[in-house]
Amino acid sequence: MAEKMPILPRQFVLGIPFVTAPLHEVLDRVESGGGLVVLPSGPGMRTLDSDAVYREALLGADYPLPDSGFMVLAWNLLHRPRLKKLSGYKYIVALLDRKTLHEPGASFWVMPSAESAARNREFLAGKGIALDDAHTYIAPLYQPPFEDPVLLSRLEALRTRHVFLTVGGGVQEPLGNYLRRNLSYRPAIHCIGAAIGFLSGDQVEIPRWVDRATLGWLWRILWRPARFIPRYWQARHLFGLIWRCHDRLPELR
């Protein structure tokens, strides 16, 4: 009888069981057994009491990771035990060094645009991960409930080991949950959003010291203030949710 793997340690924040294990343990588990990995943002988490589709996606994820610097800062200011950030930047850097990603046809990438796909494919080729057109998919303009039978069919035909969703928070998590529930096999589905863009040049490059200091949000604001100030300003609602609900799932409004 195969030995049962131990349960990874978790910490509940607003009802979401965030994985708190070291990164290498998370990657080992995802590589061996697949599953849905989400790294929810602060602006996304603040909708947990209003967006039923997004909420269901986070609750259905196998590996929710504490990527939001604002969420971690708010939690550590208000509650204990303290929570350690595990950034999408750090996650993708470590994952791209894994041997399974370098096997031919091992991964499938959903990109937000043809321009992003070109930059990301060039970067990945430099890392030894060659993507052909069959393993690249330009996302349509998704609307709720974020379902894509065409994408589902392509994945069923290819049965790739890794599926990367880079289409942005609030969309990729429900889409990943849809794939997880409807695929006949169990790949690793990585909802990494803009993290690959920080490496490829499709987004502003974030220095490692900025990521370690949980200031990636500020770096992006300085890069494009008109775009990111409104987005991160919306996240202020998350502070109130954490104050009121602690580790409990907020009621839907």
Image (cartoon, rainbow, N blue to C red):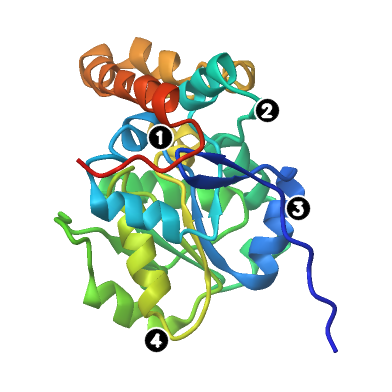
Cβ–Cβ under 8 Å for marks 2 and 4: no
141 to 115, vertically: above or below: below
Q: Is residue 111 visible?
A: no
Report the Cα–Cα distance between label 4 and label 3: 30 Å
Near mark 2 (Cα within 10 A), the count class, few <14, some 14-19 or many ≥20, is few
Q: In the displayed structure, does residue 247 sit left or right of residue 238?
A: right
Instruction: Give the spatial CA distance, label 2 vs label 3.
Output: 21 Å
In this view, the mark in front (2 or 4): 2
Kindly indicate whether the residue at mark 4 contacts the one at mark 1 (C-beta within 8 angstroms). Answer: no
In the rendered image, which quarter is residue 4 located in? bottom right
Q: Which mark is residue 25?
A: 3
Q: Residue at x 72, y 45 (%)?
A: 21
**Residue identified by numbered label 4:** 157
Q: Helix, strand or loop at disc 3? A: helix
Task: From the top left corner, tell me how far across and down residue 202 is, in percent.
Answer: 38, 35
Q: Secondary structure at mark 1?
A: loop
In the image, 237 versus 99, the foreground residue is 237
Q: Position of residue 26 (x, y in %)?
A: 69, 53
Q: Earlier in the sequence, mark 1 or mark 4?
A: 1
Q: Kindly identify which residue carries mark 2.
A: 81
Mark 2 or mark 3, earlier in chain = 3
The residue where tag 1 is placed is: 41
- Using the numbered discs, state the Cα–Cα distance from disc 1 to disc 4 in whole angstroms: 32 Å
Q: Within the image, what quadrant is residue 224 found in?
A: top left
Q: Residue at x 61, y 30 (%)?
A: 85
